[in-house]
Image (cartoon, rainbow, N blue to C red):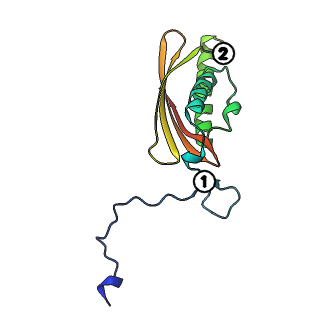
Amino acid sequence: MSEGNVARSDDHSLAPPARPARCGIADPDSEFTFLRTSATDLPDPEPLLVNLTRSVIEVIAGARNLEQLSRWISEDVYTTLVKQTVITARARTLKGQNAVRPVVHVGTVHVQSPVDDVCEAVIMVQVGRTRARAVAIRLEGIDHRWRATSIGVL
């Protein structure tokens, strides 16, 4: 047996594994598999980030229906936001408060692109007169549009 045909246990590649062209369902022949889209084939993400941030704050405040965002968010984000809206709705009920549309002023938007089809951003917002919040959003290019795969409101 020649040495070239033997796999060596200490031969580790430092390069990250190649990203699949498809994400979601493992079967690449499935019609329901999501296709990754390059950022060069997508519009500027900043307007979506600003609108999504404003909408998420309104959903959490109980002034907007979460289903309005379903086209732009992943299932995981949807589930997380449902839990968060239930918690805030319970807190409002215990305090005897009604849902009120908050006044949201979007401040700075910091955007990075760690990979071609991914956009990560932190958006600073002021809710009302006294409360400042940071919203972290990760957008991924899926099926020829941006989709939020992670949203965190701090």
Residue 143 is left or right of residue 11, and the answer is: right
Give the secondary structure at mark 2: loop
Front position in the image: 23 or 92: 23
Dividing the picture into quarters, in which one does residue 90 lie? top right
In the rendered image, residue 57, in percent from the top left (x then y), is placed at 58, 23
In the rendered image, residue 3, in percent from the top left (x then y), is placed at 29, 85
**Residue at image mark 1:** 24
Label 1 or label 2, whichever lies nearer to me, is 1
**Residue at image mark 2:** 99
Q: Quadrant where the N terminus lies? A: bottom left
Front position in the image: 125 or 102: 125
Residue located farthest toward the front when viewing the structure as drawn: 40
Q: Residue at x 47, y 17 (%)?
A: 132
In the depicted structure, whether residue 94 falls above or below residue 75: above
Disc count in the image? 2
In the rendered image, residue 58, in percent from the top left (x then y), is placed at 62, 22
Dividing the picture into quarters, in which one does residue 2 lie? bottom left
State the separation of the CA atoms marked 1 and 2.
Answer: 36 Å
In the depicted structure, whether residue 3 falls above or below residue 59: below
Q: Residue at x 56, y 49 (%)?
A: 38
Q: Amino acid at mark 1?
A: Gly
